Amino acid sequence: MTGRNEPQELLYGLLALQMGKLRKQDLVGAVEIWLNDLDLERLGSSAAHRDLRSVLREQKLVASAAEEDVEAAVQCMPEAGPERGPAIEDDLRRCLLDLEPPQALRAWLLSLGARASQTPWSPVPREDRYVLSAEIGRGGLGSVFDAEDRDLGREVAIKVLRDGGQADAERFVREAKLTARLDHPNVVPVHDFGLLSASGGNPKLFLCMKRIRGRTLRDLVDGLCAGAAEARRTLSRARLLAIFQDVCLGVAYAHSRGIIHRDLKPANVMVGEFGETLVVDWGLAKIAGAPEEVTAEHPVRQVPDQDATQLTLAGSVLGTPAYMAPEQAEGRLEDVDARSDIYALGAILYVLLTWQLPWPAGPNPSTRRGLPMLPSERVAAEGPEGNPPVSPDLDAICLRAMAVRREDRFQSAMELHHEIQLFLEGVKDRERNHGLAEGAVAKAKAAMERQKRLVDDAKLAAEEAKKVLKELKPTDDKAALWAAQDRAKELEFGAIDAFGEANAELTVALGHEKEHLDARRLRAELHWKRYLEAEARDDEKEMRVDRAIVERYNDGPFDALLNGDGTLTVRTRAYPCLCLADGRTVKPEELAWQGYHPFSGRALDGHTRAEGLPALEPGEPVRLKVHAATCGAVALDGAEVWLFRYQEAGRRLMPGTPDFRATNVAVRCIAVPPAVVDALFEPSSPYRPQGPGLYLGRTPIDRQALPMGSYLLLVSHEGRAPQRVPVSIPRCGACEQEVTLFRPEEIPPGFIPIPAGAFGYQGDPLNPYAFPAETITVDDIFFARYPVTCREYAEFLNDLAKTRPEEAARRVPRGSPESDFYWTGPPGPERAEGPYAVPTEAWFAWAPAMVKSKARRLTGCPVDWEEDWPVFGVSWEDGMAYCAWKRGREARLTTLPHELEWEKSARGTDWRYFVWGRHWDDRWANANRSAPGGLRPSRVDEFSPDESPYGVRGLAGNSRDFCLNDPGPDYFGWRISRGGRWADSGINARATNRTGYTTRIVNDSLGFRTASVIRLSRTP
């Protein structure tokens, strides 16, 4: 015995979860590590043994600031017992029990009261949502802190109002409201606004903004002035003007919305690490024409620094002295308008040209009546060494923007932006600019090559880190793993930096010569790669941004890629032999499919942790309706093909007749026969194709031009069963689909042919446990439309009881592997097939009291069993025994499906996340919020939207299916299971969701469906 109070240790984790300090999945992972330590301790290991608190601390799953709160809650429960323990959700209890805790801990978990299931996510309490850290800036009204948004798990910047009067608070509120109205790439976006808890209990106003990693324009200029080599190398005159143009664009947008900034200066311009430019600190902004809100009762704030915001009484200075227009400096606030911002822009331009303030420190800004010294003269007379000369054109632009009279200035920020652009395009400087552009392009090319190399190296390093992780045990030293992970991260960051450098250099190049062909092509190429990466992640926002940039800089080379048209080739074939109809004699050594023995589930690669059920393997040849590995299909031309396009409607992908009139696609409009549709779609199916479809003709169909996208083919041939064949046309690529046609009698009743070919496996960016995307090719398979029902399973038990009654009794649906049976009792008057009956409501109505008392409802279910439910409470071994029984009755090679066939049957070929598309709705599959009267199983023919592109039902909800294959040698005696469940949330309905169980485990929402092998694999 360990002498440790294990329930008390687990209590700490449960309370942390209930207090919102810990996520459910993190708790389960930490408990698994802790239980492993307990097992090692019981085995006499000399390694240090951690309690659960230590595991949570080491994994950084509970914030250090929250530990005291959790500990205090634990102290309120000095002894963890059922009368003092917390309530616990049933699904969490099951997850923890599945980890096989010690008996005492298991008993304690079972004794805890039930707690209603929570939604998959709950927001952090408002007062705890943001965690502030270091101060990163300071403005006229408040301080800006680096912070974490705990709800969304992202970095943000939090601006907090410093202690001040009512006037400051009103300005702060106005800043938040005005900034929130500005949605522009060069204006810092606002995420949230409200009150934040502060020391002393007094809440403070806060403004949550995008976290910009970069430096202010003032910092950049200071670096230039100080002679910093990096600043001098990267911040050319053209680059600074490009930044200034971005500032003009942001200000122009604000003016178009009627908002004046009134405090424009380099300190209020942020330049990000990837070249983005944002105007920040809108604390003094106001709506043009609106009355000034500062009154004489408001206190005075004077700041001596000329580059710091100064705020005084109405009728006096309001802004930053060095950048104030005369009307603003003199306190004529009624005269301050958009042209006052133009003056400030001119002052910023002056600083960018001279690296100095327009006016030397000293005179009061209200006394300034004339213009400052010409920028060119200032640079020649006082400029820091290394500052290039200023051209007369820039002198004129700068001083016009800073004109004393508003009427003499540029009348809009866009006009100023345009003048800078004209300067950059000036004829006199074209040759020089072209040379500079060429130099920047050369640097951009080098950075892009370096980025590609770093991306490749980062991928290899990440794979190496995964290999190191796979070889480690939980108690091993992790130094080598961390070093490998850090190396991968360092390379990834290097690739990001290289992208930013290339992007910045291209900005410089295009600033020198906006029509530079190489620079435009490289910028389009740079963002095209990012577009493809975003497309793979299904990041629509990033795709929209990058596509717009590609379209802007595309001069022709990307036309085809943007359009994405591809081709479709369809060929049909059939097996000339009659193996599926008449059967053939199969030798024991031939029995191989997908690397497993289809009878026993034994892995054929030799690893001993997936031995399956060897007793089910035949020792003599057997007669089966299956093709040999050497059987081959031959061409069978003449099949008619109709095409429908999947398009999202009501958040589901629905097949409809495409409109290709605006394209070069040549097809005939011959309607698909209703008999073909009726043969492939049940009347209740919501996915019956809309419209007549496009007739592609008879096979073979060779390189039919089609726009990229997802399609459904209906294939029909006389004397053969019609088929649904989903296909996907890749961007500018070719799809080649071979369809094997079968005679109707070759297809088992209740089964659907899944055509051979490639499909997208895993690769779900919203499933954190999904494997990387991979294209895999599988062979033809017959897949059961529905999971095995209670009615079918009862027939199996009753038949088995005639010859092996003890085995039949062991395989009755149950709540635990060897006990807690759900079904029992003799047959009713109308039943004569055997002793086992599904305890339905009708069965309970006539069953004898003694028998009735031994049968019970499914755990957690408020209603009696139904014969058309999927069977639950059965193990992988039960499923394999059922398949053996089916093989004996039908002579077909019936087995459990491999997870590859399962995922293809669910997703088709277009990488969808759910069987119906990319969005979840509780109405479309039976999950834990789908039944109005509370969660419960449903009949297999309910929830018609839960239908895959091939017509397979119930893959997203109701019952999870055991699969034939195991997760690998690291999981002794486990088998994969796939699909959603009636007791689970929608996140588990994703078609990429993978779980595993031992072969003897049973579960109240776990069942199985069968597959019928068409052709054996070649033996290893």
Image (cartoon, rainbow, N blue to C red):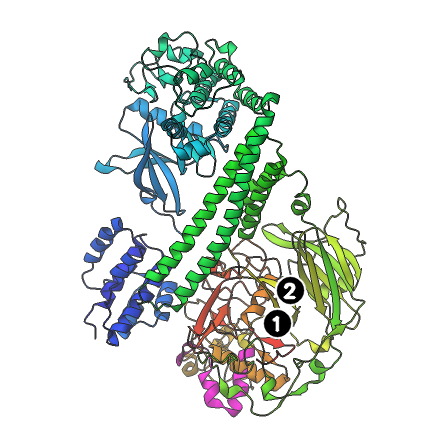
Q: Residue at x 33, y 15 (%)?
A: 361
Which residue is nearer to you in this view: 432 or 865?
Answer: 432
| Residue 34 percent coordinates (x, y) | 29, 66
Left or right: 754 as drawn, with respect to 698: left
Residue at 35% across / 66% down in the picture? 93
- On the picture, is 393 further left or further right than 714? left
- The secondary element bearing badge 1 is classed as strand
Which residues are the magenta region?
792-821
Residue type at mark 2 is Tyr
Could you tell me if the residues under marks 1 and 2 are in contact, i.e. CB atoms within 8 Å? yes
Q: Nearest the camera: 554 or 302?
A: 554
Is residue 404 visible in the rendered image? The answer is: yes
Measuring from the top left, give residue 467's x and y in whole percent. 43, 65
Residue pictured at 61% horizontal, 91% vertical: 621
In this rendering, the answer to whether 214 lies above or below 855 is: above
Tell me the SS state at disc 2. Answer: loop
- CA separation in Å, label 1 and label 2: 10 Å
From the viewer's perspective, is residue 992 above or below residue 971?
above
Q: Which residue is mark 2?
A: 950
Q: Which residue is mark 1?
A: 783
Given residues 947 and 470, the one toward you in this image is 470
Q: Is residue 151 on the magenta stretch?
A: no
Task: Give the answer, above or below, for where 63 lies relative to 700.
Answer: above
Identify residue type, mark 1: Phe
Q: Position of residue 347 (x, y in %)?
A: 43, 18
Other residues around mark 2 within 10 Å, as few (<14) / some (14–19) / many (≥20): many
- The number of numbered badges drawn on the structure is 2
The image quarter containing residue 29 is bottom left
Residue 801: within the magenta? yes
Q: Can residue 1004 be seen in this snapshot? A: no
